[in-house]
Amino acid sequence: MTTNPINSTGNSYSQAYAIYDFKELVFISGQVPETIEGIIPATFDDQCRLAWKNVEIQLNNAGMTLENLVKITVFLSGREYREANARIRKELLGSISPALTIIITGIYDEKWLLEIEAIAAR
């Protein structure tokens, strides 16, 4: 598979992301900050890391890693989480620069402070 991050921002996302010659696309439903046991961390940072961990679990189940991400949509429950979200995303993705959309919205469970959905390819 050939990829082309278009206008990479240097902040772990690109303005666009082209993929060529891919064999498989995986669409990951919104991953929430809750464990299988129903535990929801108290802080945004912990919730954000857990939601990303849940994204990684789905990627691993598909035989992929974060490097396969081509599009991410993050739903935040409030604008006050923008900076922490960006910091943690950059910490986890490093130089990986998929396309990205962030939406401020009400979330299904009021205890969740974010939700992350993704598209991956290989």
Image (cartoon, grey):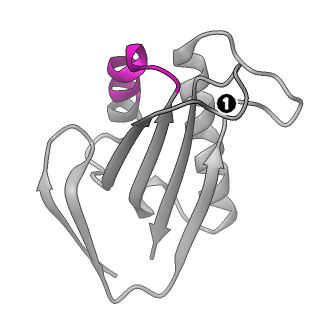
Q: Identity of the amino acid at label 1?
A: Pro
- Label 1 Cα crowd, 10 Å radius (few <14 / some 14-19 / many 20+): many
Q: Nearer the viewer, residue 72 or 122?
A: 72
Q: Residue at x 59, y 49 (%)?
A: 56
Quadrant of the rendered structure where residue 70 is?
bottom left
Residue 6, horizontal then vertical, whole percent: 14, 63
Q: Which residues are magenta?
A: 77-88
Give the residue drawn at x 48%, y 63%: 119
Q: Is residue 55 above or below residue 34?
A: below
Q: Label 1, on which residue?
A: 33
Q: Position of residue 20 (x, y in %)?
A: 29, 84
**Which residue is at 50% across, 32% downward?**
105
**Residue projecting furthest to the right:** 37
In the picture provided, is 6 more to the left or to the right than 72? left
Q: Secondary structure at mark 1?
A: loop
Q: What is the x, y in percent for residue 58? A: 66, 56
**Looking at the image, which residue sits at the far top?**
42
